[in-house]
Image (cartoon, rainbow, N blue to C red):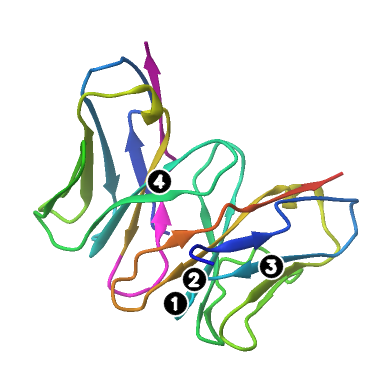
C-alpha cells in the first residue's frame, strides 16, 4: 500500500532557529496536508497544498508541494517553545478520498 | 459546536467487552473519516462516509469493527469483543467536500485491559 516517510524522525533545536522537515512518498499525490499534534490532542491542520510546485505560508510556517508530486516540505522560521509537538504530513492520490499519514517528526525546542 | 466533537475522551474496557465511540462532525461537512492512532505512530485510516453512505471500509482491521452514520451527521464506531491490540486513540475527522481538508476531533483513547 501507500507509504509516507518523514524525516527527520525527531529534532532538537534552539529557540529562534529555523526548522526544515520533509515528507516523501512512493506514490503521486494530488493533495498534501500538514498537521501538528500536541500530547492528548487531535491533529490540527496547519497548511493544505493542492498543486505541484505550490508554496503556501501560514505565519511562520511555509510548506511546499514538490514538483514530482511525491514529496512535500515544511519549514518553520524563528522557532518558539510552543512549536514543540509532532508534525505529520498526509497525502491523497487521485483514486481515493482518504489521506495516508506519515509517521511524524517530533520537534523539541530548547530555550 | 464549531469543531469536531468526540466522546468519550477516555474509555477503559475489559477484554471481550463491546465499546461504542461517538463522533459529531462540523455542521455541514459531508465527509466523515475514522482513523486509529497507536502510540508513537501516525493515524491509520479505518473508514470513510459521504453523507450516510459508507464508501470505504478497507481500513477496518477485523469484522469486530463496525461504523455507521445513519442520518449523515453523527457517526458511531463500534468495536465488539475488544482485544488488547485494539488499545489506541480513535480519531474522527470531517471534511468539506470541495477542499477535502480533514478537521480532527480530540480523539477517544481506548484502553483494553
Per the rendering, the mark at residue B22 is: 3
Residue B71 included in the magenta stretch of the image:
no
Q: Left or right of B5: which side holds A63?
A: left
Q: How far is mark 2 from mark 3, CA to CA?
A: 13 Å
Part of the protein shown in magenta: A93-111
Q: Residue B23 vs residue A77: left or right?
A: right
How far apart in space, not on screen, are marks 2 and 1 (Cα)? Answer: 6 Å
Query: Quarter holding the C terminus of chain A?
Result: top left
Of residues A32 and B106, which is closer to you in this image? B106
Q: Circle 1 is placed at which residue position? A: B29
Secondary structure, mark 2, is: loop
Q: Nearer the viewer, mark 2 or mark 3?
A: 2
Marks 4/1: CA–CA distance: 25 Å
Residue tagged 2: B26
Task: Give the CA distance from mark 3 to mark 4.
Answer: 25 Å
Which one is in front in this view, the residue at disc 4 or the one at disc 1?
Answer: 1
**SS class, disc 3:** strand
Same subunit, tags 2 and 4: no
Same chain for the residues under marks 4 and 1 in the image: no
On the image, the x and y values in percent for residue B98 come to 29, 78
Q: CA distance from mark 2 to mark 4?
A: 25 Å
Q: Chain of mark 1?
A: B
> Element at badge 1?
loop
Q: Is residue A1 visible?
A: yes
Mark 3 — on which chain does it sit?
A: B
**Does residue A94 show up magenta in the picture?**
yes
A39 over A2 or under it: above or below: above
Amino acid at each position: 500500500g501507500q507509504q509516507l516517510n518523514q524525516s527527520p524522525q525527531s529534532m532538537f533545536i534552539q529557540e529562534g532557529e529555523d526548522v526544515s522537515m520533509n515528507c516523501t512518498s512512493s506514490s503521486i499525490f494530488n493533495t498534501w496536508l500538514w498537521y501538528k499534534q500536541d500530547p492528548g490532542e487531535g491533529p490540527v491542520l496547519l497548511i493544505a497544498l493542492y498543486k505541484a510546485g505550490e508554496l503556501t505560508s501560514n505565519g511562520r510556517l511555509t510548506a511546499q508541494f514538490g514538483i514530482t508530486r511525491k514529496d512535500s516540505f515544511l519549514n518553520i522560521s524563528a522557532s518558539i517553545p510552543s512549536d514543540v509537538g509532532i508534525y505529520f504530513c498526509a497525502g491523497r492520490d487521485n483514486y481515493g478520498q482518504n489521506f495516508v499519514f506519515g509517521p511524524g517528526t517530533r520537534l523539541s525546542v530548547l530555550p | 459546536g464549531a469543531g469536531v466533537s468526540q466522546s468519550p475522551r477516555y474509555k477503559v474496557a475489559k477484554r471481550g467487552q463491546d465499546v461504542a465511540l461517538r463522533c459529531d462532525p462540523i455542521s455541514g461537512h459531508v465527509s466523515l473519516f475514522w482513523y486509529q492512532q497507536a502510540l508513537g505512530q501516525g493515524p491509520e485510516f479505518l473508514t470513510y462516509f459521504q453523507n450516510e453512505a459508507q464508501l470505504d471500509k478497507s481500513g477496518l482491521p477485523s469484522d469486530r469493527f463496525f461504523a455507521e452514520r445513519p442520518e449523515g451527521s453523527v457517526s458511531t464506531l463500534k468495536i465488539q469483543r475488544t482485544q488488547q491490540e485494539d488499545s489506541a486513540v480513535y480519531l474522527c475527522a470531517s471534511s468539506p467536500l470541495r477542499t477535502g481538508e480533514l478537521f480532527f476531533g480530540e480523539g477517544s483513547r481506548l484502553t483494553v485491559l
